[in-house]
Image (cartoon, grey):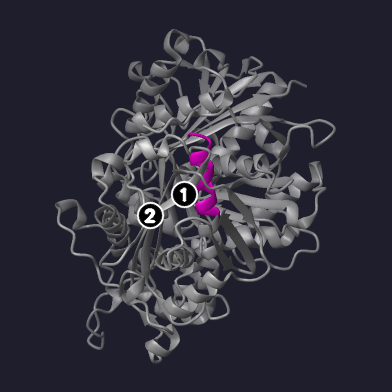
Amino acid sequence: MSFSVGPRAADDSSARAKILTGTAVEAVSVLTGWGQGVRALPPHAARAAAGRAVIPLGRPALEGERFRRATRECLLGVAAVDALLRASGISREVVKGTSTALIYVTGGAYGAANRAWVVADTARPAQPDDRPGDKRRGAVAGTLHFPYTAPSVMSGEVAIEFGLTGPYGILIGGAAATIDGLWQATRLLESGRCERALVLAVETFEDCAELYARGRWLVGRPLVEAAVCALLVPGDLRTRYDAPRAPSALETRARTRAGETLACGPLIALALGREDGATGSIGVTGEWRGRRAGLYWH
Amino acid sequence: MPAVTRQRAEPVSLVAAGVVTPFGADLDAFWSGLITGSDGISMIERFPVDDLRVGRGGEIKKLRPLPGARRVGCRATQLLLAAAADLLARSPISAEPARVAVVLGTALGGVGELERALAPGGRPRHAVGALYDSPAHALARRLGARGPVLTVGAACAAGATALGHGADLLRADVVDVVIAGGYDALCRFVMRGFDALRSLTRERVRPFDRRRSGLLLGEAAALVMMTREGATRGPRLGRLLGHASASDGSHIAAPDANGRGLELAARSALEEAGLTSADVDFVSAHGTGTPLNDRIEAEVLRRLLGRRASEIPVNSIKASVGHTMGAAAALEAVMCLLAGREGIVPYTLGLEEPDPACELDHVIGSPRAARPRISLSTSLGFGGCNAALVLEAVAQ
């Protein structure tokens, strides 16, 4: 797995003690349908997709009884945070507790659970002409399934797994919402409401592929499933949050290489920028439903 | 540990509010319904419920047609537009479109549209409206707002967090006006869900009562217009002094057994406001009427308020209009401000025999003459979400 990790370790308090007026991006982990890390991204997603509408990301094989019932999107969120901590050499004990904020952003990762819950309501007995795995058989009518339709449960599973009991933010939307989420993370850090912030984005498309096909005015192609997490910490960089008219070079590059990843796009862009060696000033933008937002560390 | 210090937040003005609730299509109907002890719960008529254990809820029976409005199919958007009409009738927006933000909390977004899309004979194109942020964007388009449009998906605590995010946008001078609040519409999706969880009561909702046996859902939209302090002349409802959130990190659908997240959220909100629990005049509790929530919340409030727990009025309005999910916290924030303005605190409908395990100074049986200046409003939601608001009312 390749990661974009800053020059300072997260628990290096002596280095941080003198630079507490701003924020910094400490690390970014990237899991996509193309593979692990930004190095797995193809040069051109549309060409690499070769006509495939969705590039799926498998269900992470996480151990533990409580993961048995969790949805794929929950597990992807857990896997992205776990990957970030492992690659950064940050112990789970460091992030555990009230000092870590969790900002979760998704455009539609709740769609699979919502769809399954609705379909279960219209379920009918199996018919001879049903295809194997036909979703109309209503396998999710039980009490364990309904809570997973809530986006907050996805971040809730992450909070449970890592013992995160600090401030949270849960934003629904595409790439512009992730910029909003990153900005909120910087606000939480700058105001002293947390000591570190995880900004997590997860997108899944496979279970609702035919519905997304009806929204082609809204989403690009190919749809690439992803789970991406950035760690923000106090640092010496100020941020500017605005509404640029045009995409940044990183936004364009992330979209070209990764494809349509909705809320994950800006975090992939951050990882790409850091892969280039940018550990200081960096700017990312993101667009959703005609609104573009930008956040710049300088 | 890094040497970061928590800062007191700049207060934000809450200029006006607009709501649509089971009591009616505006703020006046909401307030009079609360004060007169009206019951907004009824049999649900808009979709089939006969196969469910419980088919009652706080359903809005009639929505006023909006003048000049193109027909809107999405129920959640209809509620938002109705609340916005009420809000704008009280206070028009006076800011550049790019300096107006919309920040809304919801538990369900436009999920009713997904039901329409997947129903036999349904049109898949409706599924785009099922994205949880669709209603917020529809409202922004209707308002002509071209600033940030945020949808907060923090389940039943989302309305509180939306107000907090809105305040942050103002404090950072990103925008000049924020239309913030929450909404949710009743649909089979959520009725089936809570029915399956056995969270719905077949009796009446009785928050903090020893006979309490569950909640009933409701639908509503509640919006407030927020500006920076001093940016608006004329009367206003009050101020948002503090907001905070905290995760439980313990269970996806039940509150933390000790209410640690809720307590942290409440203490942090007071800290952000530069206040302590000694300054609180009134508590609007989440008070769902479920055995677990109410006991845990009461324990948290007793710890928080200390010796004053027996003298600070506490209420819950969820028996009156149902648990309106994403709208609940925003609706309750508006109620706090109206209580301070009008000098009267609505009582907790359905609460007749307080549970000793929920001992607090509950407002029981009739409204209480009091003029709370500082209110604390608490909210919880799926995923271990906890949020709190500290509000200051402006006396009339």
Residue at point 56%, 19% (across, down): B275
The extreme right residue here reads: B234
Indicate the amino acid at tag 2. Answer: Gly
Label 1's element? Answer: strand
- x, y percent for residue B37: 59, 28
The dot on residue A24 is 1
Q: Nearer the viewer, residue B85 or B319?
A: B85
Indicate the amino acid at tag 1. Answer: Ala
| Residue B377, placed above or below residue A103 | above
Q: Is residue A168 magenta?
A: no
Is B190 situated left or right of B95 in this image? left
Label 2's element? Answer: loop
Q: Are marks 1 and 2 in contact (CB under 8 Å)?
A: yes
| Residue B339, placed above or below residue A199 | above
Which residue is under mark 2? A6
- Alpha-carbon span between mark 1 and mark 2: 9 Å
Q: Is residue B65 visible?
A: no
Chain of the residue on which disc 2 is drawn:
A
